[in-house]
Image: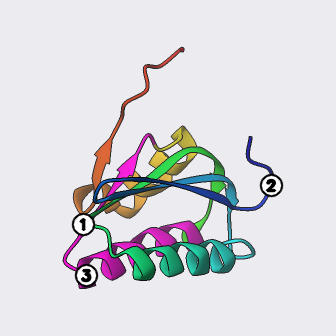
Amino acid sequence: MFKKGGQVSYEEKEDTLVVHIGGEIDHHSAVQVRTEIDARIIATKPARVLLELSGVDFMDSSGLGLIMGRFALVKKYNGTLSLLDPSPAVMKMIELAGMDRMVSIFKTKVKGI
């Protein structure tokens, strides 16, 4: 379970890096989360990165910057970045920013379960 402040864990499956992010992504936590994710991307240069965001309770504009910065970094290595199961709070921010037109979003979890 993730606690307050951005928490990160990883899964690697073939050429895909799944980054599980939870807690709150704000200006206090975004720097640490970004640094951790960047180090993993640079070290492994995956073809595909999935940011799994179902455990994010709160996200401000720093979280949007975190997503777009990782999008640019992955693209630099000729990879793709997608969002996986964004929480309602995250989805609202993504839609308000128009980011849903730029980044692929996959929803795999069924509501109510």
Q: Could you tell me the amino acid type at mark 3?
A: Tyr
Mark positioned earlier in the residue sequence (3 or 1): 1
Tag 2 or tag 3, which sits nearer the N-term? 2
Residue sitting at x 48%, y 49%: 52
The majority secondary structure of the magenta stretch comes to helix
Name the residue beneath numbered marker 2: 4
Res. 97 mark: none
Q: Examine the structure image and report whether residue 75 is included in the region drawn in magenta.
A: yes
Few, some or many C-alpha atoms within 10 Å of disc 2 (few <14, some 14-19, many ≥20)?
Answer: few
**Residue 89 picture location, percent across and down:** 57, 45
Bounds of the magenta segment: 62-85
For mark 3, give the secondary structure: loop
Quadrant of the rendered image containing residue 107: top left
* Residue nearest the observer in this picture, 40 or 27: 40
Spot the residue most to the left. 78
Kindly report the distance in space between the C-alpha atoms of the residues bearing marks 3 and 1.
8 Å
Q: Residues within 10 Å of mark 1 (few under 14, many from 20)?
A: some
Q: Do the residues bearing badges 2 and 1 touch, measured as CB atoms within 8 Å?
A: no
Name the residue beneath numbered marker 3.
77
The reply, left or right, for residue 93 in relation to residue 104 is right
Residue at the disc numbered 1: 47
Q: Is residue 112 above or below residue 24?
A: above
Classify mark 3: residues with Cα within 10 Å, few (<14), some (14-19) or many (20+): some
Label 2, label 1: how far apart the Cα atoms are: 30 Å
